[in-house]
Image: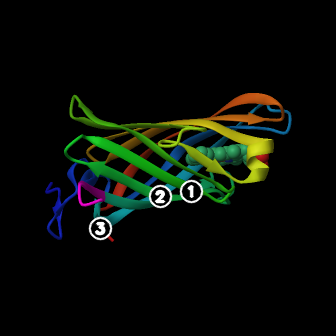
């Protein structure tokens, strides 16, 4: 597969492009007493090209954007909606992942791109308080349901994508590891 689209080399990000779906998602979120509440879900995840960016006439980045819609397996109702970018710098192998969710939480996570046994691995993390790979959230969320840290491991082999993410919360006066994981399969290669 070529990584060059419209004269832009998207490097490892090219593997993400297309539409992916799955029905194997598992969400572990806090219930009203901060106990784990598990829900099965379906995923629809669309990645399209977002072009190159040059920063300060020095840093060359390429990026793709995504929209991730998660529905409850039992009734098809949307219970998570997420948008953002994956960003790659070839000279350093740095990958960055931005996300915004409608709970009024946004973040920028960072890491290095890796390959292992033909698998492409995108590991990124962010921590509240960091001025670089950090988290911003509304005053309400900061006080009542704070996101303290975020870790995502996404891997791709051919047309199969797996992700495992841990969102470390402080909610109902307790720490809670909010975990989401899933397996998706590519259904189209549309570039956007
Ligand atoms: C596939 C990904 C995700 C799914 C399916 C999901 C789903 C959920 C669900 C069902 C709840 C419980 C809501 C309730 O009790 O009313 C929840 C809570 C929460 N999620 Fe997620 N979530 C995902 C990813 C994320 C991410 C990436 C973040 C932030 C970086 C996040 C932040 C939160 C926060 C702060 C809460 C606590 C809100 C509350 O219960 O008051 N989630 N999530």
Residue 184 magenta-highlighted: no
6 is higher (above) or lower (below) than 131? below
- Percent across and percent down for residue 53 are 29, 63
Q: CA distance from mark 1 to mark 2?
A: 6 Å
Residue 75 visible within the image: yes
Residue 18 visible within the image: no
- Percent across and percent down for residue 64 are 34, 60
Dot 3 or dot 2: first in sequence order is 2
Q: Secondary structure at mark 2?
A: strand
186 is higher (above) or lower (below) than 28? below
Residue at screen point 65% across, 59% down: 102
Q: Is the distance from the Cβ of mark 1 to the nearest ligand 1 atom less than 8 Å? A: no
Which is more toward the observer, 56 or 22? Answer: 56
User: Would you identify the image quadrant in which residue 160 lies?
Assistant: top left
Dot 1 or dot 2: first in sequence order is 2
Which is more toward the observer, 58 or 9? Answer: 58
Within 10 Å of disc 3 (Cα), the crowding (few <14, some 14-19, many 20+) is some
Disc 1 target residue: 100
**The label number, if any, that marks residue 84 in the structure image:** 2
| Discs 3/1, front | 1
Asked whether disc 1 touches disc 2, contact meaning CB atoms under 8 Å apart, the reply is yes
Which is more toward the observer, 41 or 89? Answer: 89
Q: Residue furthest front?
A: 56
Q: Quadrant of the N terminus?
A: bottom left
- Residues in magenta? 56-62
Dot 3 or dot 1: first in sequence order is 1
Q: Is residue 23 left or right of residue 48?
A: right
| Discs 3/2, front | 2
């Amino acid at each position: 597969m070529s990584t060059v689209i419209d004269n832009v080399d998207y490097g490892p990000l090219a593997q993400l492009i297309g539409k992916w779906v799955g029905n194997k998602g598992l969400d572990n979120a806090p219930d009203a007493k901060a106990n784990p509440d598990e829900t099965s879900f379906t995923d629809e995840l669309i990645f399209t090209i977002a072009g190159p960016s040059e920063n300060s006439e020095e840093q060359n980045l390429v990026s793709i954007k995504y929209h991730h819609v998660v529905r409850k397996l039992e009734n098809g109702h949307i219970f998570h909606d997420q948008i953002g970018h994956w960003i790659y710098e070839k000279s350093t192998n740095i990958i960055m992942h931005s996300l915004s969710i409608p709970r009024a939480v946004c973040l920028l996570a960072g890491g290095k791109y890796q390959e292992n046994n033909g698998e492409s691995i995108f590991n990124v993390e962010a921590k509240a308080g960091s001025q670089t790979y950090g988290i911003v959230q509304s005053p309400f969320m900061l006080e009542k349901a704070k996101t303290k840290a975020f870790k995502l491991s996404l891997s791709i082999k051919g047309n199969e994508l797996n992700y495992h993410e841990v969102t470390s919360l402080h909610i109902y006066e307790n720490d809670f590891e909010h975990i989401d994981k899933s397996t998706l399969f590519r259904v189209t290669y549309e570039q956007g």
